[in-house]
Amino acid sequence: MPLSQDRVAKENKETAKRANEIRVMSCGLMMRLFGASYPDAVCIDGYMWDADSGESDAEGITYSVGGDIPCPVCNTEKWIDLALENDSFDIREEALVYVERLKNKHKDEINPEYL
């Protein structure tokens, strides 16, 4: 059964509200990280969380998976340390180039103070 226009509009409003709540708590980065073909990671307080693990209640959204990977945008130094430790990049400058490309790709989502 196709979704009614009212239901689609309601779901779009809920999605926008959720995205705005997330942006208040973070730099706003949402990206592919946990294996999905869509942006499945969200930055909260400088760490990436699996957006698919989120549950909403009266208090807001609670995520149960993630939180151990630094955000490359707003927790850049810790992210670079982890990336170099995991041999994701050979040198720091390569990691910084990646971060700048990531910021450019997601510039419409990221809080401007982190650009």
Image (tube, rainbow, N blue to C red):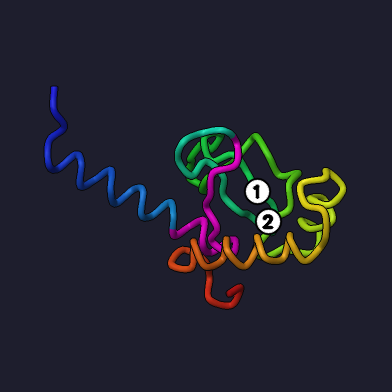
Horizontal and vertical percent position of residue 106: 49, 62
The image position of residue 54, as x and y in percent, is: 53, 38
Does the magenta portion include 32?
A: yes
Whole-Å distance between the Cαs marked 2 and 1? 6 Å
Amino acid type of disc 2? Cys
Is 93 left, or right, of 4 in this rendering?
Answer: right
Of residues 111 and 100, which is closer to you in this image? 100
Q: Would you identify the image quadrant in which residue 95 lies?
A: bottom right
Q: Which residue is mark 1?
A: 48
What SS does tag 1 mark? strand
Is residue 47 found inside the magenta-colored segment of the image? no
**Residue visible at 48% across and 40% down in the picture:** 56
Magenta-highlighted residues:
20-34
Q: Which element carries disc 2, helix, strand or loop?
A: loop
| Image vertical order of residue 61 relative to residue 37, above or below | below
Q: Quick one: label 2 or label 1, which is nearer the N terminus? A: 1
The residue shown at (12%, 35%) is: 4
In the picture, measured across the screen, residue 12 lies left or right of residue 76, that is: left
Which residue, given by chain and number where applicable, does mark 2 sit on?
71
Mark 2–mark 1 CB contact (< 8 Å)? yes
Q: Residue at x 58, y 77 (%)?
A: 113
Give the amino acid at mark 1: Met
Q: Specify few, some or many for label 1: CA neighbours under 10 Å numbering under 14, 14-19, or 20 or more.
A: many
Which residue reaches farthest bottom?
Answer: 113
Q: Quadrant of the C terminus?
A: bottom right
Does 30 sit above or below residue 26?
above
Quarter of the image where the N terminus is located: top left
Residue at image location 73% in from the left, 53% down from the top:
70
User: How many neighbours does mark 2 have within 10 angstroms: few (below 14), some (14-19), or many (20 or more)?
Assistant: many
Residue closest to the eye, 101 or 43:
101
**Which residue sits furthest right?**
85
Question: Residue 69 in the image: x percent, y percent?
Answer: 73, 47
